[in-house]
Amino acid sequence: MTGQTPLPEATVTRLPLYLRALAQHADCDTISSQELADAAGVNPAQVRKDLSYLGSNGVRGVGYRVGPLGELIASFTASHKQWPVAIVGMGNLGQALVNHAGQRARDFVVVAGFDVDPRIVGSAVEVGDGTIEVSPIESLPQVVADTGATIAVIATPPEPAQQICDLIVASGITSILNFSAAPLVTPAGVHVRHVDLAKELHVLAYHEQRNRLREEATVS
Amino acid sequence: MTGQTPLPEATVTRLPLYLRALAQHADCDTISSQELADAAGVNPAQVRKDLSYLGSNGVRGVGYRVGPLGELIASFTASHKQWPVAIVGMGNLGQALVNHAGQRARDFVVVAGFDVDPRIVGSAVEVGDGTIEVSPIESLPQVVADTGATIAVIATPPEPAQQICDLIVASGITSILNFSAAPLVTPAGVHVRHVDLAKELHVLAYHEQRNRLREEATVS
DNA sequence: TAGATTGTTAATCGATTAACAATC
DNA sequence: TAGATTGTTAATCGATTAACAATC
């Protein structure tokens, strides 16, 4: 059922959008690519193409059955599983991620939190169903082994990020979400996603700058 | 100096990386595309192509002069300016962004913060140099007008996001960084960047799922 | 001059989307 | 059958990268 040929990266990033859109249409029996596209904010042709990669299951002239389609997509992202996540850096950002996983992304369970700050280490953090105790960063290999975490989030300043990344990789984790500004170097086979807040703001600043210049040009 | 033809989006997203890499090489006189590429984690040919869009200023056989190149890039991202930012949603994520702007992204100043929670509204928040008071969401148009904010960050749950977005757009802001899971609809001319935590985690989960299936296949 | 490195071209790649035959 | 909507093809687009002539 869960395909052999890897899906295009771009398709993978859209599957969660489709799941979310389907959840909003849980009361419907079927949904067309047009409706799905509207709800997800993408092109209907793109929806059909993406879904065809999963092994198409729509009905011509009718649309897609909401229930089965949801299950099909879930079988690819394995979103029925409870993915155990470790968060390194339990400052405001780390805390925000814990809350997010607990309240919104129910397929992910935060099973471990790490920090270097002695004022934070040892404190209890509520994670969805239970509570975890923030561990010192040195204990990462042991705690990851104990908890079986397979996804790690780096929510630290950029300086220690590479070192922490090495530690994470050495502990056997193969998927990393990097919120530090540092560009991480990892061995092949490790998947890294990078979210860079400063970069996002800079891109917006570029567009603001252009708007401003364009206005000036229009005036003169 | 600051070009007429818009730069490719992909190039714009890499300019901050180059600025950061140049800062690390402030002690050098010149830097080659190879060195710059290593520091930024990209391909050297890509570096040269990107920089050529800015109006090339390298010296064949030598490389790029670190100082002037930094100024050239900064003139495009306008990173010497102090961009006034408004943050809507002052929970953990909003707080994390305030800290980030204060400590890391010094080109951005948080000039306003908003929330609906009466326990948060009215509280003081340290932002880099000074302090701001968290305002109720209703006062957004007035506060934006007073502070001159041109970039807004949405750090709220998805439910009120579209409504807040409309309010932001109506107040004249043209650049939005959206951390809510909601796909926002905006009029043409408004620039929206979307960072979706759940989506990032789901993409990693997809890869974990594939790894697991591959291992099973190898065993049998 | 010899060595190094740029700036640019052309090939390649992946993603997007319009269009339409297939078919419910 | 008539109308609707899929699944797939082919065109288009933008981004990446290898290669190399230009030139310091």
Image (cartoon, coloured by chain):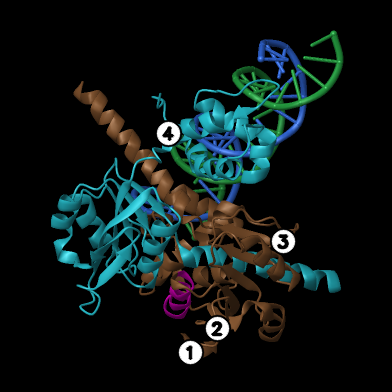
Chain colours: A brown, B cyan, C green, D blue
Q: Secondary structure at mark 1?
A: loop
> Residue at 51% of width from left, 35% of height from top?
B70
Query: Mark 4 = which residue?
Result: B76
Q: Which mark is residue A4?
A: 3
**Chain containing the residue with disc 4:** B
Give the class, few, some or many, for how many residues have Cα within 10 Å of label 3's Cα (few <14, many ≥20). few
Q: Secondary structure at mark 3?
A: loop
Query: Mark 2 = which residue?
Result: A121
Span highlighted in magenta in the image: A93-104
Q: Give the answer, above or below, for where B49 lies relative to B15.
A: above
Label 4 sits on what residue type? Phe
Closer to viewer: mark 4 or mark 1:
4
Where residue B32 sits in the image (x, y, percent)? 67, 32
**Chain containing the residue with disc 1:** A
Q: CA distance from mark 4 to mark 1?
A: 48 Å
Label 1 sits on what residue type? Asp
Q: Earlier in the sequence, mark 3 or mark 1?
A: 3
Give the class, few, some or many, for how many residues have Cα within 10 Å of label 1's Cα (few <14, many ≥20). few
Closer to viewer: mark 3 or mark 4:
4
Label 2 sits on what residue type? Val
Where residue B103 sits in the image (x, y, percent)? 43, 58
- Residues at discs 3 and 2 both on one chain: yes
Query: Mark 1 = which residue?
Result: A129
> Residue at 41% of width from left, 41% of height from top?
B79
Closer to viewer: mark 2 or mark 4:
2
Closer to viewer: mark 3 or mark 1:
1
Q: CA distance from mark 2 to mark 1?
A: 21 Å
Q: Nearer the viewer, residue A176 or A95?
A: A95
- Residues at discs 3 and 1 both on one chain: yes
- Residues at discs 3 and 4 both on one chain: no
In the displayed structure image, the side of residue B218 where residue B131 appears, left or right = left
